[in-house]
Image (cartoon, rainbow, N blue to C red):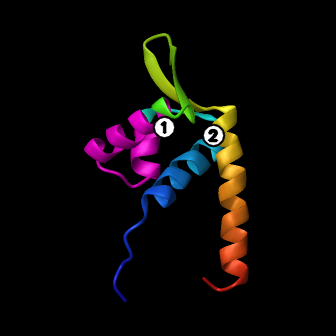
Amino acid sequence: MASKRRSKIEIIGDILFLMQRKGGKVKPTHILYGGNLSHDRLKIYIDELLVKQLIEEITDGEKKFFRITDNGLKLTEELRKIKNITDAFGL
């Protein structure tokens, strides 16, 4: 069985769900590994999520973190609804 490439929305969902599971605040390396992304692709997605205000960048001392925003949490709720519907129809 050939592996299926993830769509853009699936990758965004994976990143946001990861952040939500980790308490809303994660280091970039956790997103990199948890999202199974290359560094270049991670940067592209992080930049887009920042621009769309789904996540925000925060610093704690010298460490950089990303935190899911209220808009990001709303998107995860909607993505869960969509997944439940598609699963119910076997799609």
Instruction: Find the residue positioned furthest to the bottom.
Output: 1
User: Viewer-proximal residue, 71 or 27?
Assistant: 71
The residues colored magenta run 29-50
Residue under label 1: 49
Instruction: Find the residue positioned furthest to the left.
Output: 40
Classify mark 2: residues with Cα within 10 Å, few (<14), some (14-19) or many (20+).
Answer: many
Image quadrant for the C terminus?
A: bottom right
Residue 58 left/right relative to 87 = left
User: Viewer-proximal residue, 30 or 69?
Assistant: 69
32 inside magenta stretch: yes
Residue 54 left/right relative to 34 = right
Give the answer, above or below, for where 1 lies relative to 43. Answer: below
Q: Secondary structure at mark 2?
A: helix
16 inside magenta stretch: no
User: Viewer-proximal residue, 18 or 69?
Assistant: 69
Can residue 42 be seen in this snapshot? yes
Residue under label 2: 72
Identity of the residue drawn at 33% across and 38% down: 43
Identity of the residue drawn at 40% across and 43% down: 45
Can residue 23 be seen in this snapshot? no
Q: Position of residue 59 (x, y in %)?
A: 50, 16
